[in-house]
Amino acid sequence: MSEKDPKTSQDLTVVVQTLLQQMQDKFQTMSDQIIGRNILPHMHMSTRIDDLEKNISDLMTQAGVEELEDEIKVTETSGTA
């Protein structure tokens, strides 16, 4: 037996606890990596969608689309369509 081999049940307990802690640490690291890969792209996509919606709104304003929509609504409510 080598010097690192457990000699008593107490030594064995310490070895097992150490191994379990190392496994838990590795599992936590892997779990954090998986969550990071799944959440961050969705957050980034949400931001990109918000930016896209704003850009579309700005383009519609520049093109006068909103003004045309307002004129159509006024014409429809006044009954002179």
Image: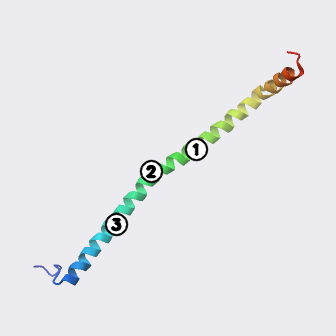
**What label sits on residue 24 in the rendered view?**
3
Residue 51 against residue 65 in the figure, above or below: below
The residues tagged by marks 2 and 1 sit, at their Cα atoms, a distance apart of 15 Å
Q: Which residue is mark 2?
A: 37
Q: Position of residue 13 (x, y in %)?
A: 24, 79
Residue at 76% x, 31% y is: 61
The quarter in which the C terminus is drawn is top right
The quarter in which the N terminus is drawn is bottom left
Label 2 vs 3, first from the N-terminus = 3
Residue at 82% x, 27% y is: 70
Do callouts 2 and 3 mark residues in contact (Cβ within 8 Å)?
no
Front of the two marks 3 and 1: 3
Dot 3 amino acid type: Gln
Q: Is 30 on the left-hand or right-hand side of 39?
A: left
Dot 2 amino acid type: Arg
Label 3 vs 1, first from the N-terminus = 3
Alpha-carbon neighbours of circle 3 within 10 Å: few (<14), some, or many (≥20)? few
Depth check, front residue: 59 or 40: 40
Q: Is 30 on the left-hand or right-hand side of 64?
A: left
Residue at 55% x, 46% y is: 44
**What label sits on residue 46 in the rendered view?**
1
Alpha-carbon neighbours of circle 1 within 10 Å: few (<14), some, or many (≥20)? few
User: On the image, which quarter does residue 33 sit in?
Assistant: bottom left
Dot 1 amino acid type: Ser
Residue at 80% x, 24% y is: 68
The residues tagged by marks 2 and 3 sit, at their Cα atoms, a distance apart of 20 Å
